Image (cartoon, rainbow, N blue to C red):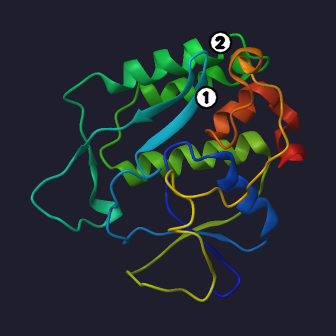
Amino acid sequence: MSNSIILPACYLPPVSYFHVIMRNEGNIVLDKYEHFPKQTYRNRTSIATANGTLNLVIPIDHGRKMHMPMKDVKINYDHEWQRLHWLSIQTAYRSSAYFEYYEDDFKEFYETQFDQLFDFNVAQLELVLKCLKIKRTIDFTSSFAKTYEGLDYRNLIHPKKESVYPNPKPYYQVFEDKTGFMPDVSIIDLIFNQGPQSKNYL
């Protein structure tokens, strides 16, 4: 694994997540066995809206286990989070230049129920890599390990920590005139606003 990038499986990860992928040539290795950490990008994403950034959080079934492997975390559908998340995404990006081009691909994730959070995140990551035209193999860990030989970003890409790609160059955002540039929000912000130029930006 010494040539790999060890990453968490995140919900529509921030732009910096893909800067990491673009700047390192190794395979992507997603950690299936890490203990699910609360208040991270594993089940939340941040989008740019007219009122600033908005966090969208996927509810999960906590169960009785304090330390549940990521691969076993189940999505909770007691509330209509899918409908609310998609409405928020539409409201934020319907006027962006490329929303209609990618809309159907992303809408599917809010009309289909995935049992496991990990599977949901992996499927979205595969779609995002396809949209960005980034060809990279995705592998998975086979057990839990505190450290790896490869480039380990599991605890570095975190909403409460400084971005691994600080001071990014601004790109056009829908509400930039009102809110100013909002850095390191979800990758869909870049894709819906920049479309085919997203990979060049990264």
Indicate which label's residue lies in the foreground, 1 or 2. 2
C-alpha gap between disc 1 and disc 2: 14 Å
Q: Amino acid at mark 2?
A: Arg
- Amino acid type at image mark 1: Asp
Q: Is residue 98 left or right of residue 107?
A: right
Residue 180 x %, y %: 73, 25
Task: Report the residue at 43% width, 53% height from top.
Answer: 40
User: What is the crowding at mark 2: few (fewer than 14 residues within 10 Å), some, or many (at least 20)?
Assistant: some
Q: Is residue 27 above or below residue 81?
A: below
Q: Secondary structure at mark 1?
A: helix
Q: Indicate the position of residue 70 as horizontal and vertical percent values.
A: 34, 62
Quadrant location of residue 189?
A: top right
Residue 92 quadrant: top right
Neighbours of disc 1 within 10 Å: few (<14), some (14-19), many (20+): few
Residue at 24 percent across and 38 percent down: it is: 76
Which residue is labeled 1 in the image?
105
Tell me what residue is drawn at x 73 percent, y 74 percent: 26
In depth, the one of 175 and 35 nearer the eye is 175
Secondary element at tag 2: loop
Residue 50 pos. (x, y %): 61, 15
User: Residue 9, image x and y in percent?
Assistant: 49, 57
Which residue does the numbered mark 2 point to in the structure image?
94
**With 180 as the anchor, is 44 left or right in this view?**
left
Q: Which mark is residue 73?
A: none
